[in-house]
Image: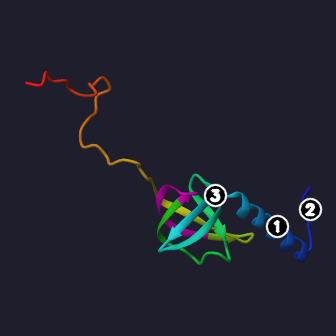
Amino acid sequence: METVFSKEIQAGLDAARLAGLRKSSRLRINVDGQVHPVLRMWKTGFAVAAEDAPHLRGLVDLYDGANHLFQCLIVAGEEEAGEMQYEFKRATAVAQSAALDFEKLANAPAGLITDGR
């Protein structure tokens, strides 16, 4: 059974839900130096409060606190219940070290010892 509320009550409930999501989420996106909090994230996209972000498009950086998680190419989806939803075209995980250009063997020695001659 679906409960129907008046527009004012539904708007108040949506505002309270968005405020709770803002406080609990550590995720944020950085777009050209502007930071926007991410309300929630799923496998193929994320949502930002509609009043916080315009229709974003292009390259953004996704952070969890100070940790850089992904560099993403996004497109704007749809606005729903005060949230602007974005879809990933590409989400590349940020590596902590440079990629190797050779195969690293599992049983390779850690170093070579010489006799000093």
**Local crowd at mark 1 within 10 Å, few (<14), some, or many (≥20)?**
few
Disc 3 element:
loop
Residue 76 in magenta stretch: yes
Residue at image position (41%, 48%) is 96
Query: What's the distance in space between the residues labelled 1 and 3, CA to CA?
Result: 18 Å
The answer to whether 95 is drawn above or below residue 60 in the figure is above
Res. 1 image quadrant: bottom right
Residue at image position (68%, 77%) is 51
- Sequence order check, earlier mark of 1 and 2: 2
Q: Quadrant of the C terminus?
A: top left
- The residue where tag 1 is placed is 16
Q: Amino acid at mark 1?
A: Ala
Badge number at residue 26:
3
- Sequence order check, earlier mark of 1 and 3: 1
Badge number at residue 3:
2
Q: Give percent across and percent down for residue 45.
A: 58, 59
Q: Give percent across and percent down for residue 43.
A: 58, 52
Q: Give percent across and percent down for residue 46.
A: 60, 61
